[in-house]
Image (cartoon, rainbow, N blue to C red):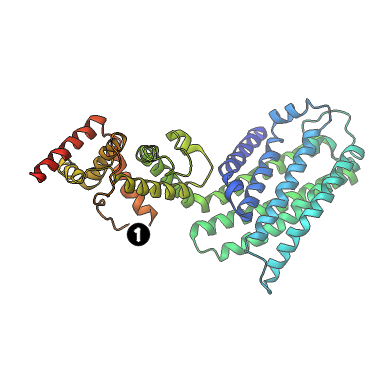
């Protein structure tokens, strides 16, 4: 059962770290610190799973997985402290609340303290901890040894401070949260930190009690397993608490990705017809959806601009009567206005491929009262839905009808 929770917790934390990875590329210091905390704890939890421990044990350093796990946890803890400190914005204000000033001071001090702590851990690991053979559980196998107790005390100093700081700040922030989702998320994260504080204090008590008052091996294993289950539970609560406030953002991102998926045929053909319209060469639908060059909302804004710019260029190739012909062809369509625009674009692209640009542009497309990128993208989704089903023959037929209208108007 314990192994199951280890794998579950490691998997959940790894998925969250992967989900938030774009913050490394285009996020601010606040978001990068949050990702660093998730990534560090994901590595630490993975190193706690039997499969990864067995793989690391192939390296000829006894119990190396434990040392690496504690290194990763220390890095994650420092990132978490930085995240809490940067939650209050920039530190340029002359006067700040005491709890904010203390959090920022602790975050700044965590970097040199972390370097000292990692150095001490390394020295104690290779000198004070008796490691004659590989162990399945570092703490339960070494509990009762003064060297291991000193080693674990150095390590537990960092989560002791971090859980106290984060627990206080997140509990306090939950009372002032503006939205229900943020309030619930912060409350759960605060609860998890108080659970972490209790876990850390219990572990410190266990390691030193075993040194001062020898306990049976079965008692030690039971206490260690119980606190391990407690730790995995608190990490799951952290994951849930951190995910709740992001549900709206996740829904918005999913909506944006769906819009990009629907717009791709229209955008791809337009920027391919006019190289240089887009900042980068267009790729396949899958390639465009999975790349992380820029955030999805920024990409959507660029795509709408690319489509608008390309349509302006098409006005120098489209016959004057093309839009009238498109409106006549789509009069019986269930969604006639975007359908007319889609047919106009398809035919104009075909005309651009076979004729030279005119000196004068034809009349513009019908003006739309767009107020933002989302409203423009919603319209273009309707246009692209029709455009995706227009064949080359349909575009050619429309050009022919346009030419006939030109002859009629000339007569």
Q: Residue furthest right?
A: 127
Which of the 4 image quadrants contains residue 405?
Answer: top left
Residue at position x 31%, y 41% in the image: 384
- Image height of 168 relative to 391, above or below: below
Residue 187 against residue 45 in the figure, above or below: below
Residue, far top: 58
Determine the secondary structure under disc 1.
loop
Picture quadrant where residue 97 is located: bottom right
* Total labels drawn: 1
Residue situated furthest left in the rendering = 411
Quadrant, the N terminus: top right
Looking at the picture, tell me which residue is in the foreground, 30 or 268: 268
The answer, for residue 134, to whether it is visible in the render is yes
State the residue position of label 1: 371
Q: In the figure, residue 214 lies in which quadrant? A: top right
Determine the residue positioned at 16% across, 38% down. Answer: 403
- Residue 14 lies, in percent from the top left, at 61, 39
Position of residue 314 measured from the top left corner of the image (x, y, whole percent):
31, 44
Is 73 above or below relative to 99?
above
Residue reaching furthest to the bottom: 95
286 with respect to 192 (left or right)? left
Q: Is residue 167 visible?
A: no
Q: Residues within 10 Å of mark 1 (few under 14, many from 20)?
A: few
Residue 168 vertical placement versus 268 (above, below): below
In depth, the one of 9 and 221 nearer the eye is 9
Question: Which quadrant, please, contains the C terminus?
Answer: top left
The x and y percentages for residue 128 are 91, 40
**In this rendering, would 411 be left or right of 379?**
left
Coordinates of residue 27 in the picture (x, y in percent): 59, 51
Residue shown at the point (69%, 51%) measured from the top left? 79
Judge by depth and name the residue closer to the eye, 341 or 334. 341
**Left or right: 170 in relation to 60:** left
């Amino acid at each position: 059962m314990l192994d199951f929770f280890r794998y579950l917790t490691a998997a959940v934390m790894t998925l969250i770290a992967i989900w938030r990875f774009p913050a490394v590329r285009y996020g601010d210091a606040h978001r990068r610190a949050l990702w660093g905390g998730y990534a560090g704890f994901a590595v630490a939890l993975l190193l706690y799973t039997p499969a990864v421990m067995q793989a690391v044990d192939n390296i000829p350093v006894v119990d190396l997985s434990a040392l690496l796990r504690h290194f990763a946890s220390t890095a994650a803890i420092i990132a978490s402290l930085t995240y809490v400190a940067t939650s209050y914005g920039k530190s340029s204000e002359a006067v700040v609340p005491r709890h904010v000033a203390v959090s920022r001071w602790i975050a700044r001090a965590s970097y040199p303290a972390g370097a000292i702590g990692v150095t001490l851990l390394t020295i104690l690991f290779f000198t004070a901890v008796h490691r004659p053979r590989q162990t399945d559980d570092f703490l339960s196998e070494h509990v009762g040894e003064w060297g291991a107790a000193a080693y674990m005390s150095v390590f537990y100093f960092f989560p002791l401070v971090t859980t106290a700081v984060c627990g206080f700040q997140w509990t306090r922030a939950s009372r002032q949260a503006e939205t229900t989702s943020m309030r619930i998320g912060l409350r759960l994260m605060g609860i998890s930190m108080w659970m972490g504080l209790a876990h850390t204090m219990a572990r410190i008590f266990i390691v030193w009690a075993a040194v001062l008052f020898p306990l049976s091996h079965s008692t030690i294993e039971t206490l260690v397993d119980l606190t391990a289950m407690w730790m995995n539970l608190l990490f799951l609560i952290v994951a849930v608490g951190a995910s709740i406030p992001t549900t709206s953002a996740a829904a918005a991102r999913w909506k944006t990705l769906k819009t990009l998926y629907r717009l791709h045929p229209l955008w791809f053909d337009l920027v391919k017809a006019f190289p240089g319209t887009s900042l980068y060469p267009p790729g396949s639908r899958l390639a465009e959806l999975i790349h992380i060059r820029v955030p999805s909302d920024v990409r959507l804004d660029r795509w709408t601009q690319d489509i608008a710019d390309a349509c302006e260029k098409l006005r120098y190739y489209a016959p004057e009567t093309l839009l009238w012909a498109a409106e006549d062809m789509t009069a019986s369509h269930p969604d006639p206005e975007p359908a007319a625009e889609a047919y106009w674009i398809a035919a104009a692209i075909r005309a651009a491929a076979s004729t030279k640009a005119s000196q004068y542009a034809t009349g513009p497309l019908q003006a739309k009262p767009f107020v933002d990128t989302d409203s423009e993208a919603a319209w273009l989704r309707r246009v692209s839905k029709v455009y995706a089903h227009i064949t080359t023959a349909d575009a050619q037929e429309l050009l022919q009808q346009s030419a006939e209208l030109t002859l009629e108007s000339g007569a």
